[in-house]
Image (cartoon, rainbow, N blue to C red):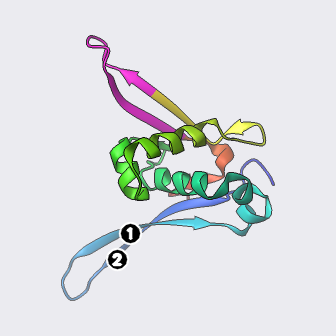
Amino acid sequence: MTDTQRLVSVESQTEYSVTSGATETRIFVKFYVEAVRSGMIADLGPERLQTLIVLASYMGADGTCYPTQWQIANSLGIKRETAGRRVAALAEYRWKGQPLILRERKRHPESKIWENTTYKILPISGLSIFDK
């Protein structure tokens, strides 16, 4: 597998209704056969894979995502605390010695209260979004 080979991609498709004039954009996550053949899917396991897919559904073009733990939990159908543990397990996971995601927690500069957590899905994951 080369460093640029995609294992997973996120793509958008916009449909236009001739009768109503309405447009609808849908986002799809595609898994390439190489994701299975490389062993990544088996190595990730079902919970980390499911969590990666949910994070990918919030991903922007640069790989950054900003979902709350509540959003992640609702998307996975689990409790918020469980979502936090799953994201932590995914952040600790290494594929070929490298993390698939980076997680950055930020505190408010004055109150020091935890604010938003930012996630960055890294290129080693083979996951890209909206690539032509």
The alpha-carbon separation of the residues under discs 1 and 2 comes to: 8 Å
Q: With 125 as the anchor, is 129 left or right in this view?
A: left
Residue at screen point 54% across, 37% down: 88
Question: For numbered disc 1, what is the local secondary structure?
Answer: strand
Which tag, 1 or 2, sits closer to the chain's start?
Answer: 2
Q: With 47 as the anchor, is 13 left or right in this view?
A: left
Cβ atoms under marks 1 and 2 closer than 8 Å: yes
Mark 2 burial class by Cα count in 10 Å: few <14, some 14-19, many 20+: few
Q: With 85 as the anchor, is 114 left or right in this view?
A: left
Q: Give, as a three-letter code, the residue at label 1.
A: Arg
Q: Is residue 123 above or below residue 15?
A: above
Part of the protein shown in magenta: 105-120
Image location (x, y in percent) of residue 85 = 51, 40
Mark 1 burial class by Cα count in 10 Å: few <14, some 14-19, many 20+: few
What secondary structure characterizes most of the magenta part? strand
Image location (x, y in percent) of residue 122 = 60, 41
Residue farthest along the left direction in this orientation? 20
For the N terminus, the image quarter is bottom right
Question: Can residue 67 be seen at all in this image of the molecule?
Answer: no
Residue at screen point 48% across, 28% down: 104
Pointer 2 residue: 15
Image location (x, y in percent) of residue 15 = 34, 77
Residue situated in front as seen by the camera: 4 or 64: 64
Q: Give, as a three-letter code, the residue at label 2.
A: Glu
